[in-house]
Amino acid sequence: MTGPGLLNRQRRRRIIASMFAFSCAAAATLCVVVLFLLVGKIFSEGAAWLNWDFLWNLPSRHPEKAGIKTALAGSLWLTGLTAVISLPVGIGAAVYLEEYAAVSRWKKLFQINIANLAGVPSIVYGILGLAVFVQLFTLGSSLISGALTLSLVILPIIILATQEALRGVPDSIRHASYALGATRWQTVRHQVLPAAMPGIMTGVILALSRAIGEAAPLVAVGAMAYVPFVPSGPTDQFSALPIQIFNWAARPKAEFHQIAGAAIIVLLFVLICMNVTAVAVRHFYGKRVRW
Amino acid sequence: MVMDRRSLLPNSSKKQTVTTYTMTTTEPIAMDDPTTADDAISRVPTVPVNPPIAQSENSASAEGLPSANVKLVTRNLRFFYGSVQALSDISMSIPVNRVTALIGPSGCGKSTFLRCLNRMNDMIEKTRVEGDVLLDGNDVYKPGTDVVELRKRVGMVFQKSNPFPKSIFENVAYGPRLTGINGRAELQEIVEKSLKRAALLDEVKDRLNDSALRLSGGQQQRLCIARALATSPEVLLMDEPASALDPASTTRIEDLIFELRERYTIVIVTHNMQQAARVSDQTGFFYEGQLIEVGPTRQLFTTPTEKQTEDYITGRFG
Amino acid sequence: MRFADTTVSLASDDGITGGVTRFRYWFERAIHVFLFACAGISVLTTVSIVFVLLVESVRFFFDVSVFDFLTDTKWTPLLKPQHFGILPLMCGTLLVAFGSSLIAIPIGLGTAIFLSEYAPPRLRDVIKPLVEVLAGIPSVVYGYFAVVSISPLVRSTFPSAGPFNAASACVVVGIMTLPMIISLSEDALRAVPRSLREGAYALGATKFDTTAHVVVPAAMSGIVASFLLAISRAIGETMAVTLAAGATPKATLNPLESVQTMTAYIVQISQGDTPAGTVEYRTIFAVGLALFLSTMVINLVAQGILSRMREKYE
């Protein structure tokens, strides 16, 4: 190899290296740009339509009269019911797996099953909800059917997050409790769960914010875009914010796209509030408990 | 402070009993600290009536003891982690209101033995126990034994202080609460009494509602002792309680152990031979899962009968 | 299962066991059963999904032969003459999955490499939360973005594209799966031990050499797993695809045409008023079964790769 040839090769390698670094940086920039484009577009379309009437009006065929009152109410109902159903079950399952189940093949099977459930498309849960809750249990296309279905969707998320939080509680705490004559449940109830609570709450809030944004399973169990009344109980028919957004976005008229944008702003606002709560919970408790 | 502590002791007069064997173990602090010197006198066993706590390695003599003076007896205790045998045929008796120290190199099985006594090893998967552990003559491994009740009678303090992430008060009150005591006044009384016995009350009485995690390491360990005392145990197991502490805190814990033996039967695991010599009445030497030798502390440290014991205490290994 | 240790066993008569109350025993036992039931619900969910999909699909296949289902090239369950060939739906799904991977894989991997190898920590602390925000945005919002932004962009670039087209679905699903690829790949890259990098630097390798020839190959299994999970997510993606790609079941590979994915078909039937019990209604279970099986197989493979990778580094 001669001198100039070596130099050439070195230069080429340097160029390739800097191009590689540049493309990686460009890819990262692109991700951020897309996020800003997305949010920017939503606000430019919807912000003008956002006002008090929009929040308090019933859905309508005329975009200028349409509002999200029933959809918002439906989403709140759904979130509440889903929380009530999925929290005890999800936390209970995680406690069983972390604190009760012996390290065994069974536990591994549970674990694989949960990881797998987390990857099942949400529309498949919708089909399950349709067949089991709507048809078999004859609950109809009601809030409770929707909430049960959403609970199944977010159950794996809650279980995995809770397990993570329980694993963060040092064994010394459990041993101390057992050594004082506590039973297994007393140890879990009085020591382990309280210590793991910040982590569990964070996971639960994130799971619920996933539930608020889900539309596919609700479509399958028969949520409707046009519900002219606010649901008064779990057996009522319902709409939900994502359903309303889907319906408006699917229409060709530009005004509907604009009010869909306004509805998305409301939805994102709710999601941001929940995430801020999650971060605050983590921050607040994170300071107090340190092992 | 030290005088205070002494006055806390309910029957300090009882301590001034005659001795059959005297303290000869070197104890530097004893010389320049009058209180400790005082302790040194009181260190003498109150029940020298049965010096046969000195046993040979084959401790059939354990069963020959008048049972009133023996709190815990193990007979041919074996312990397995899976297929690995961690303890082989440990037979030992632990006299009432005495401090029994267990010494030996790391991994010799002394902690495992300790954890067999209140069945904490039950928590570990794939372990197996053979042989008997008798608490006041009752086998604690008998099917149908209430482990929860056993652990209330046999308290434990761990190597690393492990306070619950709660207030000082709640830490101590946890045990009594488990037994259904909920009255605030009653709990307050128990908490204060326990903290007092653990020589911690004076330091924390104004901040019982502060987080236990804010206490210093030594205070945390004494809190853990107070917490264990709150369930009124008969036996107190201590697994290297001072190994993570600075010398000053260690001294406090040792003084405390010495006082506690008035009321409790204490078994302490330690890797520190000086500590064993300072605080215990009886010492057992463990090596590779076997109890090589057990006897009165002074005797074990001055005239060990076994070669391995001698090698260990003279620092030839471990 | 072991109950013996801290769960209380029943009382006997000696001193140690005297304090046991039957109540505490049964209470502990009841709690144990309740918690076991909670964990059991997750298994029951899987079993129910399989059972429901299988039973309804079997009934579906009484009316439609499996052979027709797999080989017919037309899918027109709601029109006469009815055809029940899943190929067009499969084709639509695969087109979107493939197209979205083409977008998400290079951008996602590039971002992951940037975050793990190149970005200064401060920049990383800014970009990572933003990527997480991207992951938290609901699917229907992405669908909206496809309708109002991406589709018009595609149409202005390729005038032959319709208002609904597979290309905009590919782009939007690509964006949606980015966070998954980024976070999992970055985890895999960061799990590569320092010693390996230092070994490469010690041989005189540049940052690029180390990254491209040592770190990325070492993290390859985790990276591949992230690709697989992203593809599985793309296959199961519903609302965004329905809004972007339309509802025209067509066995085409042209991304400018409107297609229908399996998920979009299920939405279409769910929104209509197809009466339960009819063969048209049962189509969603047969399609659901195909969807469930394909995502499950991919997920299991990815989980397998990930768990083997974890073992390797522990």
Image (tube, coloured by chain):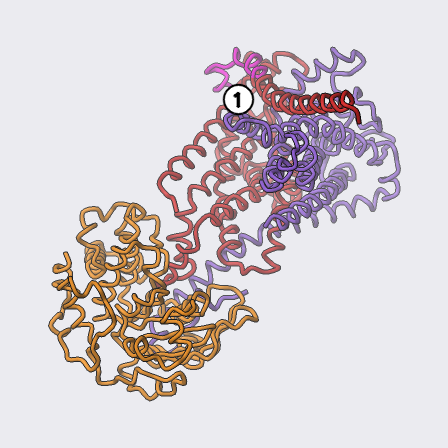
The hue in which chain A appears in the rendered picture of the protein: red
Q: Is residue A173 left or right of residue B171?
A: right
Q: Residue at x 33, y 61 (%)?
A: B241
Of all residues shown, which one is farthest toward the bottom? B64
Q: Point out the stretch of residues depicted in magenta.
A: A40-58
Q: Is residue A64 left or right of residue B195?
A: right
**Foreground residue among B157 and C75:** B157
Residue A149: say if magenta.
Answer: no
Residue A37 place in picture, x, y as percent: 60, 17
Residue C174 in which image quadrant: top right
* Residue B251 is at least partly visible in this image: yes
Q: Residue at x 38, y 76 (%)?
A: B310
The hue in which chain B appears in the rendered picture of the protein: orange
Q: Which chain is purple in the picture?
A: C
Residue A171 in which image quadrant: bottom left
* Residue A136 is at least partly visible in this image: no
Amino acid type of disc 1?
Ile
Q: Residue at x 50, y 58 (%)?
A: A100
Mark 1 chain: A
